């Protein structure tokens, strides 16, 4: 067994989980909401990349023995991410915003409903049949490209959150939404921007994973979304570095199980980790215990 290759596999898969987990943790940070539809936005990102590749002629080009250029691949990512950013804004505006003053259970049930709507709506629109995703990146550079792209997006997110006005506004809303509103911050715009940003990262993860495992279907986001949610909880939901750490640890744990010859248990690892975290450290590895008003 090549340990180095297994570490690379874990890093690759963990990077994808981390990108999805960032969306969970950002939305929770500003709204205290678990957006269970986030995994399905990841699925829509994969389909967005698929249809963008078809529209740009990349699929037919590859079928004829050609290869996708850097600009074409960048355009596919940009189209998929922009489409999902708009979907994220739409979901926030019409599904979650009207329920902000409602009990949290109401928002949680709504999130589950939106998730199911996207899943079964995806089956109706895209058909349940799996589709092959075009090989946009040469296999020799595939894992390096995935990790590098994920890292660049994570660094970009960190710069947005820490170095820009909108990032400072996001942190202010996360700390105290009412106080941020009194200070002149348009909280509706900031929350919508947070959904857009998280959804765009999920779309990028969907495209990266579809290149890595080149088959897509409308239920693609179910298990990936659950694992990324566990990653966010593991790192400390609401904590951006924690989401990255949790995603990487999830990827390494899953790869270790497969390398040990127990591949049939790879999906069970996520739920085992979730149970352990909830029992031993409910706030997550980088989370802080805080009293909550009820």
Image: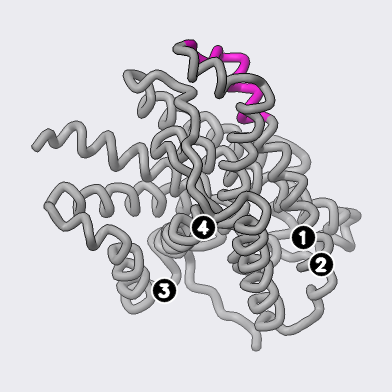
Ranked by sequence position, the earlier of labels 1 and 4 is 1
Q: What's the mark number on residue 219?
A: 4
Snapshot quadrant of residue 158: top right
The answer to whether residue 28 shows anywhere in this view is no
Using a 10 Å C-alpha cutoff, classify the residue at mark 3 as few (fewer than 14 neighbours), some (14 to 19) or many (20 or more).
some
Ranked by sequence position, the earlier of labels 3 and 2 is 2
Q: Nearer the viewer's eye, disc 2 or disc 4?
A: 4
What's the magenta region?
A: 66-78
- For the N terminus, the image quarter is top left
Using the image as rendered, state which of residue 13 and residue 28 is in the foreground: 13
Left or right: 109 with respect to 220?
right
Using a 10 Å C-alpha cutoff, classify the residue at mark 4 as few (fewer than 14 neighbours), some (14 to 19) or many (20 or more).
many
Q: What's the mark number on residue 282?
A: 3
- Magenta region includes residue 69: yes
- Magenta region includes residue 255: no
Q: What's the mark number on residue 92?
A: 1
Q: Position of residue 239 (x, y in %)?
A: 53, 56
Q: CA distance from mark 3 to mark 2?
A: 28 Å
């Amino acid at each position: 067994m090549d340990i180095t290759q297994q570490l690379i596999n874990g890093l690759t898969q963990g990077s994808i989980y981390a990108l999805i987990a960032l969306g969970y943790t950002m939305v929770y940070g500003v709204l205290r909401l678990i957006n269970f539809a986030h995994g399905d936005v990841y699925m829509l990102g994969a389909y967005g990349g698929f249809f963008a590749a078809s529209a740009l002629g990349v699929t037919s080009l590859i079928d004829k023995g050609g290869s996708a250029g850097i600009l074409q691949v960048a355009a596919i990512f940009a189209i998929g991410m922009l489409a999902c950013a708009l979907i994220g804004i739409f979901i926030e505006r019409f599904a979650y915003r009207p329920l902000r003053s409602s009990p949290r259970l109401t928002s949680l049930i709504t999130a589950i409903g939106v998730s199911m709507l996207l899943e079964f709506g995806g089956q109706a629109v895209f058909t349940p049949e799996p589709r092959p995703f075009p090989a946009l990146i040469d296999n020799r550079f595939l894992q390096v490209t995935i990790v590098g792209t994920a890292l660049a997006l994570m660094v970009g997110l960190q710069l947005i959150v820490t170095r820009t006005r909108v990032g400072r506004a996001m942190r202010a809303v996360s700390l105290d939404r009412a106080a941020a509103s009194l200070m002149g911050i348009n909280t509706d715009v900031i929350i919508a921007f947070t959904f857009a940003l998280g959804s765009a990262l999920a779309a990028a993860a969907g495209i990266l994973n579809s290149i890595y495992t080149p088959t897509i279907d409308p239920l693609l986001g179910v298990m990936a979304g659950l694992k990324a949610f566990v990653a966010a909880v593991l790192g400390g939901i609401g904590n951006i570095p924690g989401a990255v750490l949790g995603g990487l640890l999830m990827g390494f744990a899953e790869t270790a199980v497969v390398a040990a010859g127990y591949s049939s248990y790879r999906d069970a690892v996520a739920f085992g980790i979730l149970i352990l975290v909830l029992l031993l450290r409910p706030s997550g590895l980088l989370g802080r215990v805080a009293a909550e008003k009820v």
